[in-house]
Amino acid sequence: MNILMIGDVCSTPGRTLLKEHLPSLVEEFEADFTVINGENLSGGRGITEKNAQEMLNLPVDAITLGNHAWDQIETEEFIDHYPQIVRPLNYPEPCPGRGIAYIEKCGKTVAVTNLIGDALMHGLIPCFYTMNNQYAEIAHNSDILLIDFHAEATAEKIAFGYFMEGKATAVVGTHTHVQTVDARILEGGTAYITDLGMTGTLNGVIGVRREIVINNSLTKINRRFKQEKSKPWQLNGVCIQVDDDTNRAVAIERIYRIYE
């Protein structure tokens, strides 16, 4: 089984890239299952129902979110109607949506989950504690476990990868929007990368117009961010090969494409 996991899809450029290139990527990598991080789908902040439907009409099996999950007011109204959309598991229980999606594909039950890290992020239920409590149930109900670890600190991401070593089929980092070069298979057959990178414009500052970020840094007058949309655009992610007998990862390949 081959699994595509695509990094933070940002605004119009990211959505356009997936509409134009995801079908051919699925064919190129003979992908059976695709996960995208969609917390920046709509104007760079959050996800609207229209954009969610647009992505799910592509060969996308699951959409994970992150710290911008609720930036679009409508999200809490529609999210319960979409079992393929996964908000962070370590939000409190009254929060709408689901933190785990169980999806049947290729004769396997694939569990997709999403957690926000503790360091420099929101004060949610601690991520290690949350997964420690939930893991036995997830393992009982699934064959393959894919974790989108949405976190700021690289050390925390690495620690979480080792924490889930031999338990998860894959632990991939998102949120920092810059692809790392440490994709590897940990002992026990867990595919790992510290950050998938982003899918969107290349010339902005992680998707935002560079002049706004630079001016904010110079003056400390924090102007509202606006998304950069100029080309070139980038598409980042990984393809993970999973052994059908053991459900363990046996290979991981970085995907880094530039489109003029």
Image: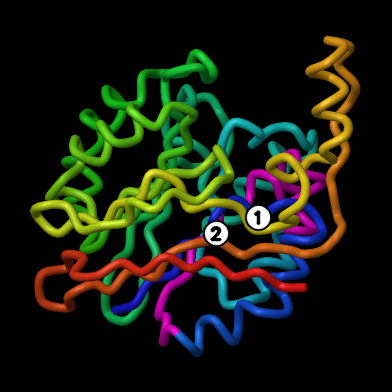
Which residue is at a point 52% across and 24% down the rendered structure image? 94
- Which amino acid does the dot numbered 1 rest on? Val
Which residue is at a point 89% across and 26% down the rendered structure image? 224
Q: At which x and y percent is residue 226? A: 88, 38
Does the CB distance between marks 1 and 2 fall below 8 Å? Answer: yes
The tag earlier along the polypeptide, 1 or 2, is: 1
Which residue is at a point 78% across and 18% down the rendered structure image? 217
Callout 2: 10 Å neighbours few (<14), some, many (20+)? many
In the drawing, does residue 255 fall left or right of residue 166?
A: right
Which residue is at a point 83% across and 15% down the rendered structure image? 218
Q: Is residue 46 part of the magenta span, yes or no?
A: yes
In the drawing, does residue 141 fall left or right of residue 125?
A: left
Label placed on residue 36: 2
Q: Residue furthest top?
A: 220
Q: At which x and y percent is residue 188? A: 9, 54
Image quadrant where one finds the N terminus: bottom left
In the image, 87 versus 25, the foreground residue is 25
In the displayed structure, 118 sits above or below 255; it is above
> Which residue matches tag 1?
9
The magenta region covers: 29-51
Q: Is residue 100 part of the magenta span, yes or no?
A: no
| Kind of element beneath mark 2 | strand
In the drawing, does residue 44 fall left or right of residue 186?
A: right
